[in-house]
Image (cartoon, rainbow, N blue to C red):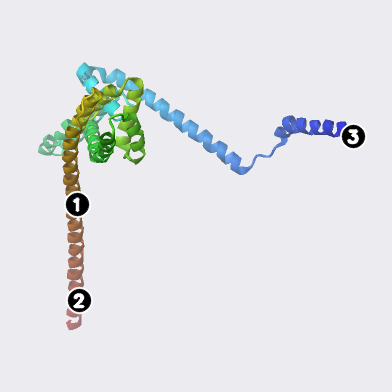
Amino acid sequence: MFVKIIAFSAILYLLKQFAYPFFMIVTKKQKAQVRNYAKTQREEEKKRKEQEDKRRLARTIAKPFMSDQKAEELEKLLMRLNKDKLPEEVVLDQIIYMALGILVSFVLFTANSTLGLVAGIFIVLGWFYPVDELRKEVDTKNTNIALDFPEFYSMVFYQYSKSVNIYLADVIRDYIPNANDDLAGELGVMLDNIDYSDEAFALRQLKKRVPKHFIIKFCDLMETRLRGYDNIAQMQYLKNEIDAFRVAELEKELEKRRRQNDKVQFALICVLVLYIIIYFIFDILGALKLFQ
C-alpha cells in the first residue's frame, strides 16, 4: 500500500511538471505584466539604438569642430558629472543649437533686417549653451559639496582629536549615510581610491575633482598628518574657518528666503490692490447706470 501511494505521488508530480504547464490558465494580471515587460524592453532597445545612432552621427559630424584640448576638457566635465555621454555628442548639441539660431535669425531677417541682425546673438549663444550648462552643473555640484562639507570635517576633526590612530576610510563610511547626494558620491569615490591605492592618493584626487578652498586645505592637512606630523592646531584653525563659512552661508540663505518672502508679500499686496480697484470701478459703473 505504501509503495502504491509513493508511485501515485510520483505520477502526480510528473503530470504537474510536464503536463500542467500546457493547460495552465494565464491570468489577466500575468498577461499585463508580460506585455508591460515586453513594452519596457522595446522602449529600452529603441533608446539604446537612438543613442548609438546619435553617437555615430556625432563622431562623423563633430570631429572637425573639436580640438584635442576641447575633447579633454569636455571629457573631464562629463566624468565629473557621471554622464553617459561622449564629448562628440556635446559638440553635436552645440552644432544643433547653432543651426537653430541661424534658422531663427534667417526667418526674422526676412521679416525685418534689423531684427534679424539682432537675433544673430542666438547663434553665438547656441554654440556656448551646452558647454556652459555642463560647467554650471559642475559648479552647482561643487557648491553642494562645499555646503555639506563642514559637518563632515567636524566629524573628522572630532575623531582625529581623540586619537592619532584613526583610519580615514572608517570615518568616511560612518558619515556617508548622513551626507547629501553630491558629497556622498565624492566620498564613495574616495573609498574606491583608498581601496585602489591609499589615503594619500584619494586625497590628491579629491583636490583635483573639487578645487574648493576648504577642501584643498583639508586634503593638505590630512596628507601632512599621514606623514606622521601632529597638526591638530592647524586642523582647529581650519575648523574655525569652516564654521565661519557655514554661518556666512546660513546668513545668505536666510537673506535669500527673506527676499523671496518680501517678493511674495509684495505680489499679494499688488493683487489685493488690483482687486480693490476693479471692485470700485464696477461699483462706480453700477452707480452711473442708476442715474442714467
Q: How far, Cα to Cα, is label 2 from label 1?
A: 43 Å
Q: Read off the residue under disc 1.
A: 254
Q: How far, Cα to Cα, is label 1 from label 3?
A: 85 Å
Q: Earlier in the sequence, mark 2 or mark 3?
A: 3
The amino acid at mark 1 is Leu
Indicate the quadrant where residue 100 lies. top left
Image height of 256 relative to 274, above or below: above
Quarter of the image with the C terminus is bottom left
Query: What is the number of the mark on residue 283?
Result: 2
User: What is the secondary structure assignment of the residue under circle 1?
Assistant: helix
Residue 138, can we see it?
A: yes
Residue extending farthest right: 1
Q: How far, Cα to Cα, is label 2 from label 3?
A: 102 Å
Q: Residue at x 27, y 34 (%)?
A: 160
User: What is the secondary structure assignment of the residue under circle 3?
Assistant: loop
Residue 87, can we see it?
A: no
The amino acid at mark 2 is Asp
Q: Residue at x 30, y 18 (%)?
A: 60
Q: Earlier in the sequence, mark 2 or mark 1?
A: 1
